Amino acid sequence: MGARVGTVLVVGGTGPTGPPIVSGLVTRGHDVTVFHTGRHEIAGAPDVPHLHGSPFDADGIAETLGERTFDTVVATYGRVRLLASHLAGRCGHFVAVGGVPVYAGYVDPSAVFPSGVALPVREDAPLVAPDAPRSAGYDVAPIRRTEDHVFTLGEQGAFGATYLRYPTIYGPRNPYAWEWNVVRRVLDGRRTVILADGGHGIHSRMAVRNAAEAVLLAVDKPEVASGKAYNVADDALLTLRQWVQLVAEVAGGELEIRSLPWEIAGPGRAMSAFGGAESACCVLDTTRLREDLGYRDVVGLREGLAETVDWMRANEDLLRSNGTTDPFDYAAEDALLAAYDEALAGLSGVAEPFRTGIGRMKVPQTAKGSL
C-alpha cells in the first residue's frame, strides 16, 4: 500500500460503510479500535478491540476515550463536533464523514437562485448557512456548523482535518434502504411502481465499498487530504427511473413505471431522501478525490446492487417489520392511478390545441441540407 501504519480509532464501524473501512484498515496493517454504543455488533467483522459508550454526548465520549491518543480518527457516527473537540490534540489526522445536504440548494432548492444546486457540484460550491432554517423535515445548519468546527480545529493545529461528503449510499446494513421500495414490490409480485415526474432526476450515489475506499485513501494520504473536503460518488450516473429499473431487474423482476406529478405522487416521493423536495438533480464532481487521492471505483454498479439486494433478501423479515417511508398500500396506489387516468382522459380535449400547434410548427430540415 505504501501508506504509513499506526493506531486508528473508528467511531461507528458497524453501519453500512463501517465494516469495509475497518477491514481495509486492518489489511493495511493499522492497529484499529472501534468506538460505538455496542447495540449493533456485526457477525464476521474483523476481530479488533471495541470500546462501548455513547459517542453522542461529551460525557460519554470523555468517559469512554479518556486520555487515549491515536494517529488517525475516522468519525462515521456520533456527534462529530463533540468527538473533534475531545480528540483535538489527541490525534494526528481527523477524518470525518458528512453528506451532500451541506450544499446550499440541495435540501431546499428555493434557498438559491436559480433553484437547486448548480451542476456539477464542486467542493467549493456555496454551503448552507450556519443558521439555515429546517427544511423538508431536516436540520441542515448543524452539518455546516460541524464542518466549520472540524476545519477550524484543523487550522488551529489540533489535527489534520479531512471531510468526506457522502451522497446517497446503497449496500448492506443501510438504515435508509431506499432500494427496498423496489425490491419489496418485486417480492410481492407487484407489477407497477409510481415515480414522481417520471423519475427523471439524476442524483449521485455510492456503493458502500466504494465509499469505504474513499475513506481509506484519505487515511493513506494525510499530508494530501488534510485541510480538504472531498465529494465522493460512484462513476455511474443514472436517473431515478433507470435506478428503479435496474434494482428491479437485479431483484429478479420488472416494474411498469407510472409517472405522476410530484404534487400527488406520494409513493414515488418515498423513493427519495427528502420526499422529492430536494434539488431535482445533484451530480457531484469527484475530480479532487480522483486527482488528489487516486480514487477509482472498487465495485461496479451491478455488483454493488447485487450485494444490496442479496442483503435485503436475507433480512426480509427485518425490513418488512421496520418499514421505510413507503406504506406499500397497493390498493391506494391503484385507486390513485385509476383516478389519475380518468383525469387525464378528461383533460385530453383541453390539451388538443397544444398538440396540434406543436404538430404544425416548422422545423429547419438541416439534415437535408436546407433551412
Image (spheres, rainbow, N blue to C red):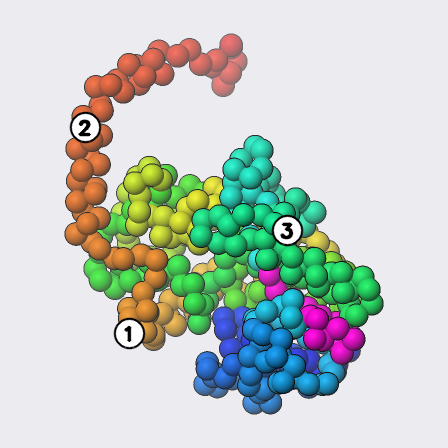
Write down the region rendered in magenta.
84-98
Residue found 51% across the figure and 10% down from its top: 370
Q: Position of residue 189 (x, y in %)?
A: 21, 59
Disc 2/disc 1 C-alpha distance (Å): 41 Å
Which residue appears farthest toward the front when viewing the image? Answer: 59
Disc 3 marks a residue whose amino acid type is Pro
Disc 2 residue crowd, few under 14, some 14–19, many 20+, Cα 10 Å:
few
Where, by quadrant of the figure, is residue 63 drawn? bottom right
Asked if the residues shown at circle 2 and circle 3 are in contact, with their CB atoms under 8 angstroms apart, the answer is: no
Where, by quadrant of the figure, is residue 212 drawn? bottom right
For marks 2 and 3, the one nearer the N-term is 3
Q: Position of residue 329 (x, y in %)?
A: 22, 55
- The residue that label 3 is drawn on is 130
Classify 319 as above or below 253: below
Secondary element under disc 2, as helix, strand or loop, is: helix
Secondary element under disc 3, as helix, strand or loop, is: loop
Q: Position of residue 209 (x, y in %)?
A: 54, 68
- Residue 86: say if magenta: yes
Secondary element under disc 1, as helix, strand or loop, is: helix
Q: Nearer the viewer, mark 2 or mark 3?
A: 3
Residue found 73% across the figure and 56% down from its top: 291
- The residue that label 1 is drawn on is 317
Classify 53 as above or below 140: below
For marks 3 and 1, the one nearer the N-term is 3
Classify 306 as above or below 59: above
Q: Quadrant of the N terminus?
A: bottom right
Disc 1 residue crowd, few under 14, some 14–19, many 20+, Cα 10 Å:
few
Disc 3/disc 1 C-alpha distance (Å): 41 Å
Disc 3 residue crowd, few under 14, some 14–19, many 20+, Cα 10 Å:
some
